[in-house]
Image (cartoon, helix red, strand yellow):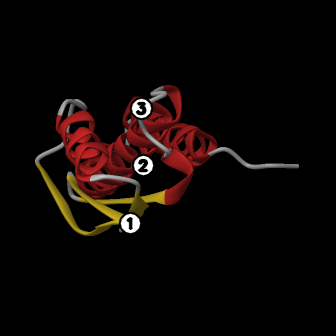
């Protein structure tokens, strides 16, 4: 069975929601002295998970945008995202296709920058 990149984001989000809910239960049981450190730890974990979800979401969105665009051969472009910076690699048929890939990537919400040095133009 083929796994979809967005499935990992859903699993991570579910885990984060479960963690945040468990913190609230501890606070409701009158364990406020224990709930405070758990809330801080949960907050830090949620921030890390949000970063991962954001990067995963961005990568998935960029890939799906490429595949939906008839002017791009999205199957030949590898997409990686780290803290909102998207790296494109692979080979495209023309400089216009490379420019379009960069433009499409920059239009995605959450993208801070695009590195396309490894995206080569076939000659």
What's the distance in space between the residues labelled 3 and 2, CA to CA?
24 Å
Residue with the most extreme right position: 1
Place residue 20 in its image quadrant: top left
For label 3, the residue is 71
Mark 3 element type:
loop
Q: Is residue 48 left or right of residue 15?
A: left
Place residue 58 in its image quadrant: top left
For label 1, the residue is 122
Crowding around mark 2 (Cα neighbors within 10 Å: few <14, some 14 to 19, many 20+) is many
Marks 3 and 2, the one that precedes in the sequence: 2
Marks 1 and 2, the one that precedes in the sequence: 2
For label 2, the residue is 56
Mark 1 element type:
loop
What's the distance in space between the residues labelled 1 and 3, CA to CA?
15 Å
State whether residue 37 is above or below residue 111: below
Residue with the most extreme left position: 112
| Residue in the picture at 37% in, 54% down | 52
State whether residue 62 is above or below residue 119: above
Rendering coords of residue 44 (x, y %): 25, 56
Image mark count: 3
Marks 1 and 3, the one that precedes in the sequence: 3
Mark 2 element type:
helix
State whether residue 40 is above or below residue 122: above
């Amino acid at each position: 069975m083929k796994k979809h990149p967005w499935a990992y984001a859903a699993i991570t989000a579910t885990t984060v929601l479960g963690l945040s809910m468990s913190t609230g239960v501890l606070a409701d049981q009158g364990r406020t002295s224990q709930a405070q450190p758990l809330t801080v730890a949960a907050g830090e974990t949620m921030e890390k998970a949000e970063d991962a979800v954001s990067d995963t979401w961005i990568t998935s969105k960029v890939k799906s945008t490429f595949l939906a665009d008839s002017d791009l051969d999205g199957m030949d472009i590898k997409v990686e995202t780290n803290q909102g910076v998207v790296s494109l690699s692979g080979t495209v048929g023309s400089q216009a296709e490379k420019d379009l890939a960069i433009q499409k990537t920059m239009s995605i919400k959450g993208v801070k920058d695009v590195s396309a040095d490894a995206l080569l133009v076939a000659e």
